[in-house]
Amino acid sequence: MKKGRTSPGFIRHIHPVSIPLKALELKSTWALGGISLILVMLLMGSGALMLFVYRPFPAYAYASVLELKNQYSFGQMIRNMHYFAANLLVVTVFAHMLRVFFTGGYQGQRRLNWIVGVYLFCCVLLSCFTGYLLPWDQTAYWAVTICINMFGYIPGGDILKGLFVNSHGVSEKTLQLFFTLHTTGIPSLMILFMGIHFWKIRKAKGVVTSGLNLLTEAEKPVMVKTNPHLLLREAVATLILVAFIMVLSFFFDAPLGDMANAGLSPNPAKAPWYFSGFQELLLHFHPFFAVFLIPFMLLCTLFYLPFIRFKHRDIQDEGVWFISSRGKKIAVAAVLFAMILASAFILVDEIVPDVQTWLPGVPVILSEGVIPFGLAALLVLLFHFWMKKQFRLSDAEAFQTSAVFLIITFMIFTLTCVWFRGEGMKLCFLGGCG
Amino acid sequence: MIDAGSSATYEPGTVTAFVAAQFYLVCLEDGGFLAMSGKCTHLGCAVPWDKDQQKFICPCHASEFDISGNVLSSPAPRALDLFEVTIVNKNILVNTGKRLERTRFKAGQPVFPEIVKNRNKQ
Ligand code: HEM
Ligand code: FES
């Protein structure tokens, strides 16, 4: 080894020789991006192994998953690892996104990388969605049927829908397309985006860390060598994560229902948990709003976020959690507000009869869409401006407060759908959920 | 084309499921026939006929439809789709290739067997 070369060559393509000590602190990143990367690698490994057995045809898919389970040693284990890694990945990528948002890591030279991150997030969700169909069991078949039929409510959606289904609905056409996207299309895109993502992090001289921007030219941050300080941590994190997934996979099996049956929908037919928030929205709003307008607005906000110019926001608070200590306190308040208001909204909507019954003859798009959505939007705006005035928040703090409010609301919706919806999607509590 | 047999075998006010072809043959109280798609108009779940409650109840998001396919309870936006029915010599034929979307049930949708003149004599 040449003198001065401190880590193996290939690592130096990824990491710099030394990094600020501050970036190593757990609370700067919670290591969520790194954990996500390891999970993606686990997914690619376990997925590639399953390709030796899995057959993407409606008549054989379910049987091949059973075969994987019964006739190959560790076949079920590999499938479980794929399943748990995928589910965990949704959590870690989402949490990673929240981390970047709440530490202000989407500004300045990191703007473009936030956009790449949004693409990666979409890829993860699409991976999960396309993978979900592959076992071809009842849950898979009906969840995908419901999701694809949602296109029917989107302008131009019928054309999109036509790409995925034929006159029999979800069929061999859908399975082949999903399989190809799942095993080739989306992984290729992810590799591409991840490459750009990591390259951009280096270009920005590492992750956001509080205070580093304030140092003058003469002051130098405390630096440590990547090898061993960062590499060792990465190795330990990887081992713990892989061990964790393996233990989970050893003791718990990935679910597999009965084989898909086009004539019988299960009751309740629930979406996978990461789409449950939208399924809960569907119970309250016309599908045009629940599965098109609201997700579309969220996506636009995600893309637009780095380009918003907040008054009084400067680089001093980059890397500071929740902008300021006041921002942090108000965020906690927003969490409480959201928990109360969102639960109240769900309960009230369950008890109060539909607008439809008071105003018969009004088109559903108004009674189930514009009116309830308008009311909900009004509530959010009122909250935003009331908090802003009450606590004299800066624009950035007020935006963050409302974002917290909406994120927590969405989480409550998700949990409600997962835990408190029973037969016929009626509200139920603990014992009564069957 | 699916041959559903003789119209005389269906009692008025009954619903018969054709599972493989995914439709219901409904014989209304007045003897008119409807071939109704078994797919919920909300998001496409298979809707079972609940004989006790005399309704179609969707297991997915709880839409309800009456025997003629009209929406009794949202979120379904429109009545169950129809397939084309032709009755030739009391023999019912259903064309599942021809799907008719409708907002609600209207007179004129049901198809009646030809009036048999010497019915009383039978
Ligand atoms: C990039 C992230 C990926 C995610 C988030 C993901 C997610 C999923 C999910 C949620 C399932 C359904 C599992 C179940 O319900 O049991 C699945 C199945 C499957 N995936 Fe992936 N996957 C990813 C990458 C890959 C890759 C790269 C391959 C192949 C090269 C692959 C091959 C498969 C196969 C063959 C199945 C069907 C077997 C089964 O359902 O158990 N996956 N995936
Ligand atoms: S699919 Fe029937 S109510 Fe949603």
Image (cartoon, rainbow, N blue to C red):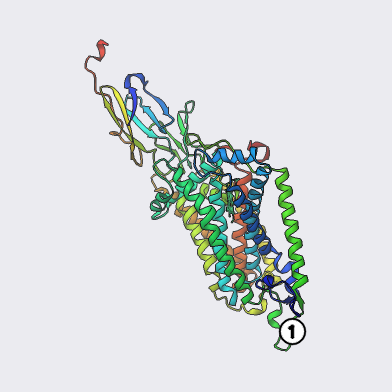
Residue B45 vs residue A6, the one in the foreground: A6
Residue at the disc numbered 1 = A220
Picture residue at 65% right of the left edge, 70% below the top: A391
From this view, report whether residue B45 is shown above or below residue A88. Answer: above
Q: Residue pushed farthest front?
A: A1
Pinpoint residue A59: horizontal percent, then vertical percent.
Answer: 50, 38
Q: Is residue A58 left or right of residue A96?
A: left
Q: Residue pushed farthest top?
A: B121
Pinpoint residue A337: horizontal percent, then vertical percent.
Answer: 64, 58
Q: Give amino acid for label 1.
A: Lys
Residue A180 vs residue A110, the one in the foreground: A180
In the picture, the quarter occupied by the C terminus of chain A is top right
Q: Secondary structure at mark 1?
A: loop
From this view, report whether residue B95 is shown above or below residue A20. Answer: above
From this view, report whether residue A248 is shown above or below residue A110. Answer: above
Picture residue at 60% right of the left edge, 72% below the top: A199
In the picture, the quarter occupied by the N terminus of chain A is bottom right
Pinpoint residue A254: horizontal percent, then vertical percent.
Answer: 64, 44
The answer to whether residue A256 is visible is no
Q: Quadrant of residue A223?
A: bottom right
